[in-house]
Amino acid sequence: MRWRDRYGIRRLRGQKVAKFDREATDADIEALIAFARSRRGVEFYVEPETFATDTTAMAVADDGEWTRRRVGSPAVIHKVARDLALPVYDVQLTGYPPRMRAYNERRRREEGSL
């Protein structure tokens, strides 16, 4: 079965893929969409491409729960966010939301008490 480019990943991505990474797929984008649709207050944070990873986006819910997936290009997650009427931020400009750190800390404490 031929891989479809439903979200414009191939068309909107940069010219190169990081050397040690795989490319974003429809499954990556669909995971972000499913996360956003199943939680309240979701915001997207775009993370830049690095030498080791392709451009990624984090979806952060209002309680701080989060997920990260490859998106191939900031334009892809901007399109998804527009379609879902959700905000999208550049993490280099805004940083990560404090609720995400609080969520991570709660998870660490819960795992430590088990």
Image (cartoon, rainbow, N blue to C red):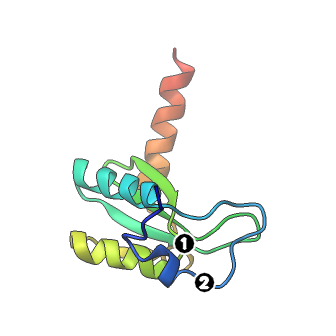
Q: Residue at x 41, y 61 (%)?
A: 29
What is the CA distance from the residue labelled 1 to the residue labelled 2? 7 Å
Q: Residues within 10 Å of mark 2 (few under 14, many from 20)?
A: some
The mark tally for this picture is 2
Residue, disc 2: 14
Q: Residues within 10 Å of mark 1 (few under 14, many from 20)?
A: many
The answer to whether the residue labelled 1 contacts the one labelled 2, judged by CB atoms less than 8 Å apart, is yes
Residue, disc 1: 72
Can you see residue 14?
A: yes
Query: Which kind of residue does numbered mark 1 sit on?
Result: Gly
On the image, the x and y values in percent for residue 8 come to 42, 77
Query: Which kind of residue does numbered mark 2 sit on?
Result: Gly
Front residue (pair 59, 19): 19
Residue 85 position by quadrant: bottom left
Q: Residue at x 49, y 72 (%)?
A: 46
On the image, the x and y values in percent for residue 109 come to 51, 29
